[in-house]
Image: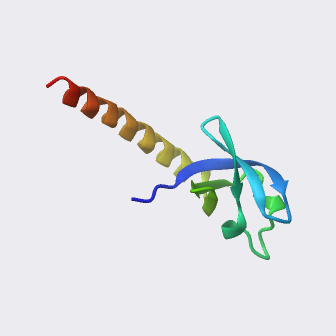
Amino acid sequence: MCLGIPGRVVEITDVGNKLGMVDVCGVRRQINLACVVNESHSVQSCVGDWVLVHVGFAMSRIDEQEAQLTLDLLKQLGEAQSEIEAMRLSN
């Protein structure tokens, strides 16, 4: 399964190589923005954008509401995973 994690672009680190810094729940990583830029949306205009990040690439731009819903769902899945693991270990 491929999983895209929502993150917010907080800084452009290399315009020429289309690299930027994304914040995912307080963790910052450099990612490639090439898939989300075009003539009408430059690399510099990505600051503040919410993007889905997969293996170091911003795969698409999303709105803040979609980002928050996805983050909430991922947190819920994480909690469910913890509960399932606890049940497995209790046998």
Give the mark count: 0
| Rendered-image quadrant of the C terminus | top left
Q: Is residue 55 left or right of residue 89?
A: right
Residue 49 pos. (x, y %): 70, 54
Relative to 88, say whether 49 is above or below: below
- Asked where in the image residue 59 lies, by quadrant, the reply is bottom right
User: Left of 7 or right of it: where is 2?
Assistant: left
The x, y position of residue 2, in whole percent, is 44, 59
Which residue occupies 59% across, 55% down?
Answer: 53
Query: Which of 6/57 is in front?
Result: 57
- Is residue 12 shown above or below 85? below
Which residue: 42% across, 44% down?
A: 73
What colour-coding does the image apply? rainbow
Q: Is residue 81 left or right of residue 38?
A: left
Residue 33 pos. (x, y %): 71, 62
- Indicate the quadrant where residue 78 lies: top left
* Residue at screen point 57% across, 50% down: 6
The N terminus - image quarter: bottom left
Residue 87 vs residue 41, the one in the foreground: 87
As drawn, the residue found furthest toward the left would be 91
In this view, the residue farthest toward the bottom is: 39
User: Could you tell me which residue is drawn at 68 percent across and 45 percent down?
Assistant: 29
